[in-house]
Image (cartoon, rainbow, N blue to C red):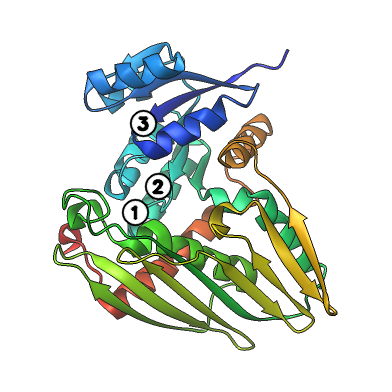
Amino acid sequence: MQQKIRWGIVGLGNIAHHFVKDLLLIETAEITAVASRTLNKAEEFAQEYGIEHTFGSYEELFKCHEVDVIYIATPHTFHAKLAIDAMYYGKHVLCEKPLGVNRVEVEKMIAAAKENDVFLMEALWSRFNPSILKITELITEGVIGGIKYINADFAFPALHRDVENRLLNPNLAGGSLLDIGIYPIFLAYLLLGKPDKIMASSKFFTTGIEMQTAMLFDYTDAQALLYSGLNSKSEMKAEISGTKGSIFIDPKWHEAQGFLLEINGETIHYELPTKGRGYYYEILEVHNCLMDAKRESSLWNFENSLDLITLMDTIRKQTGIVFPFEE
């Protein structure tokens, strides 16, 4: 019988609940420990999912010998320190996106992974979504020809939330760009690579966070129009247009259950429902990498994470997005 990979969970908000429910669908996974800054919260979470070990500090979990890999789902500002601390205790790490708040943090995290010979991956779950995988396969095969245009957005109303909420709090690297703008940026980068030029514009909220950002990625032969926002709702559709045809990803495209291919006057709908919420596939990737003794994923590697954060740094510089702890 294959030995189970033992998980520890750090940061017990909504995303962690979705993640753990998908983790429970995987036979080779076992959730052995959770940690929160308050022990009561850890105990409540553990009781809900039948988890054996609970800790009132993150360091205690990092020291736990019953844990192989740690999933970090805290606000962005804690990602780098927690991931680095965990890796220095010899733990493998799957860290929520963005991996770090800026390129400097991501570089430090990758250096820690290499120094401690452990696995590290940014939890960009859309990369492993069956629809996204099938779309990249079709594009590689040249089914829609050369890509000339991408349009992708991600927006929902969030300004009514408490100002201390992570999305609205600049001290927690709040705003739309790092939290949801990362998805449209990822799609353009995945399909077209790094742009030759970026043009971007942002609007700001009273708390100081950026509440909406429009982006144009300009390539030698193509353009991508991208958008993220917290002050209104968008359809959350994505369109990929090529010289021979187009692909329209079903909303919400970042967690797609299928897509539409239009080619030669015909329409084909691919139905690719996810298992669970969709975190299932990034978890499988972690397991496959660990079983093969790989220290980074071939589907989303260190260079990809560095490129992605560099693109976001560039947008932030253009639009004036600066967090208080960076000043």
Residue 319 left/right relative to 314: left
Q: Position of residue 159 (x, y in %)?
A: 24, 59
Label 1: few (<14), some or many (≥20) within 10 Å?
some
Q: Which residue is drawn at 45% across and 18% down?
A: 49
Residue 33 visible:
yes
Q: Residue at x 26, y 56 (%)?
A: 173
Label 3: few (<14), some or many (≥20) within 10 Å?
many
Q: Which mark is residue 10?
A: 3
Q: Which amino acid does label 2 sit on?
A: Met
| Extreme residue toward the bottom, this view | 220
Q: Position of residue 293 (x, y in %)?
A: 64, 33
Q: Which amino acid does label 1 sit on?
A: Glu
Which residue was labeled with disc 2?
Answer: 109
Residue 103 visible:
no
Label 2: few (<14), some or many (≥20) within 10 Å?
many
Q: Residue at x 77, y 73 (%)?
A: 262
Q: Position of residue 47 (x, y in %)?
A: 38, 14
Which residue was labeled with disc 1?
Answer: 105
Compute the Cα span from label 2 to label 1. 6 Å
Are circles 2 and 3 on residues that touch, CB within 8 Å? no
Are circles 2 and 1 on residues that touch, CB within 8 Å? yes
Residue 143 left/right relative to 316: right
Residue 276 left/right relative to 202: right
Are circles 3 and 1 on residues that touch, CB within 8 Å? no
